[in-house]
Image (cartoon, grey):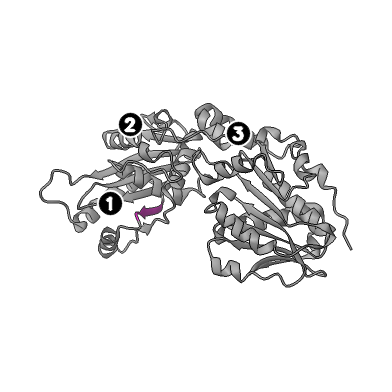
């Protein structure tokens, strides 16, 4: 017996009406950030679940540890919006949302663990819907097909078909598989390809604060705005960073002060430079490069040992922390650098935190997000000139641009890497997203 829910059509923007009424077996929703596309899918899945008590939906992310804070939270929100959350049990281990009476509901799985995916069993009812959130992050169309094939082997009751839902923000790289996938299926009778942006929000889901933030992106870096909020595939360009977004300061503005110090370290003591960036986070939510330690062994017959670098790094950190009189939030270092990390702990009983590296393109995206917000500054001094120069010269390898895995030129990028490690580690604190 189906259950009545709050009228869902009142909660979705008109641009999504074709999605709501779609009879297609594949509905792919792409577009810019803050377009509410994920909210629409979760609302649709809840409405369908309550109409067909025996049905189940499965939501997928490429990486399992992202499920809780994304699709699980999104379905939870939609159930509350529908006024039926009290009818469900919300489980965290494993992640499941199950109807108290029917025994059916919502399941969640990562595609990064094939064995767990194979062992995913739905004990009651049938699978009616598959949702691939951040669809572009999956390894390719073959990965999607394999998951689909697992669940479409049997005919469903009530004349239903298994419906696939995909949602993602288009990547800037035009050569990623998802762009070919969209073009391949654009005129496919089994597919609805839908695009939306924050400009389609007529119901006021986006606050004045987020709209002001979007306008700042638009003013500071229009190409980044086109990609991030209009969902346009803008290409990679040649220079990785927009040099105009590195804003110079002679000193901190009046009334602005550092509330936390962050240190990022990249080391290659035998063959390349060692860099330590000292960044201050201010009471105005700005990020300021305050100083930088830089040592290059190039042209030196006797190169500094880890014991020497350890002492010099510690002296630099002590000097800058005393100068700025702010607490140290963290000291993060390249996870591949074991010698200096071990030496530093041996000398000072302080652990340098190894960075949790992401794909280089993703780490770059976090830095670009910070720059595009217009929140990054650097103090004008000799030590920071190297930082700015390396970032201005940081370039994509043109031979790899026409591929789904573009590379950067690995030349004089030591402060660049140190800054990337720092930014991705601080991303949550600084409200950075990609």
The x and y percentages for residue 2 are 87, 60
Residue 108 placement: quadrant = bottom right
Mark 3 vs 1, N-terminal side: 3
Q: Label 2 belongs to which residue?
A: 380
Label 1 near label 2: C-beta < 8 Å?
A: no
Q: Residue at x 30, y 44 (%)?
A: 414
Tag 3, which secondary structure?
loop
Q: Residues within 10 Å of mark 1 (few under 14, many from 20)?
A: many
299 to the left or right of 5 = left
Front: mark 3 or 1 = 3
Front: mark 2 or 1 = 1
Q: Residue at x 33, y 31 (%)?
A: 380
Q: Label 3 belongs to which residue?
A: 230
Query: Where are the magenta residues, as a range?
Result: 329-334
Q: Residue 267 bears which disc, if any?
A: 1
Q: Is residue 26 above or below residue 104?
A: above
Task: Tell me if residue 118 is in the magenta stretch.
Answer: no
The x and y percentages for residue 146 are 59, 60
Tag 2, which secondary structure?
loop
- Depth check: 344 or 221 in front? 221
Front: mark 3 or 2 = 3
Q: Is residue 75 above or below residue 282?
A: below
- Depth check: 373 or 397 in front? 397
Q: Is residue 217 above or below residue 45?
A: above
């Amino acid at each position: 017996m189906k259950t009545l829910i709050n009228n869902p059509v009142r909660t979705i923007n008109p641009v999504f009406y074709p999605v709501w009424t779609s009879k297609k077996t594949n509905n792919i929703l792409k577009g810019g950030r803050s377009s509410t596309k994920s909210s629409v899918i979760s609302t649709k899945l809840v409405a369908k679940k309550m109409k067909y008590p025996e049905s189940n939906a499965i939501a997928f992310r490429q990486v399992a540890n992202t499920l809780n804070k994304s699709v699980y939270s999104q379905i939870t929100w939609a159930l509350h919006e529908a006024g039926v959350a009290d009818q469900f049990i919300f489980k965290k281990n494993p992640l499941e949302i199950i109807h108290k009476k029917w025994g059916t509901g919502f399941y969640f799985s990562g595609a990064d663990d094939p064995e767990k995916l194979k062992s995913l069993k739905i004990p009651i009812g049938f699978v009616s819907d598959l949702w691939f959130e951040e669809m572009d992050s999956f390894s390719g169309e073959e990965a999607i097909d394999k998951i689909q094939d697992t669940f479409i082997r049997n005919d469903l009751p009530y004349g239903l078909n298994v419906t696939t839902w995909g949602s993602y923000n288009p990547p800037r790289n035009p050569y990623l598989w998802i762009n070919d996938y969209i073009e391949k299926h654009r005129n496919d009778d089994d597919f609805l390809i839908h695009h939306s942006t924050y400009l389609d929000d007529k119901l006021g889901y986006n606050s004045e604060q987020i709209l002001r933030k979007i306008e700042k992106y638009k003013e500071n870096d229009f190409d980044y705005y086109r990609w991030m909020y209009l969902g346009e595939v803008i290409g990679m360009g040649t220079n990785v960073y927009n040099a105009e977004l590195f804003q110079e300061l002679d000193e901190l503005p009046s009334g602005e002060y550092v509330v936390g110090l962050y240190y990022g370290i990249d080391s290659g003591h035998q063959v390349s430079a060692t860099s330590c960036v000292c960044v201050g986070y201010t009471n105005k939510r700005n990020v300021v490069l305050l100083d930088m330690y830089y040592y290059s062994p190039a042209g030196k017959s006797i190169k500094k040992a880890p014991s020497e670098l350890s002492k010099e790094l510690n002296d630099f950190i002590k000097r800058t922390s005393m100068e700025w009189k702010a607490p140290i939030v963290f000291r993060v270092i390249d996870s591949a650098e074991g010698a200096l990390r071990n030496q530093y702990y041996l000398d000072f009983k302080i652990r340098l935190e190894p960075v949790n590296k992401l794909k280089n393109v993703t780490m770059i995206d976090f830095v670009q997000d910070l720059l595009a917000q217009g929140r990054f500054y650097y103090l004008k001094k000799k030590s920071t000139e190297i930082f700015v120069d390396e970032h201005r010269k940081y370039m994509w390898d043109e031979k790899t641009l026409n591929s789904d895995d573009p590379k950067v030129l690995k030349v004089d990028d030591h402060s660049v890497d140190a800054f990337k490690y720092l930014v991705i580690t601080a991303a949550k604190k600084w409200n950075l997203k990609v």
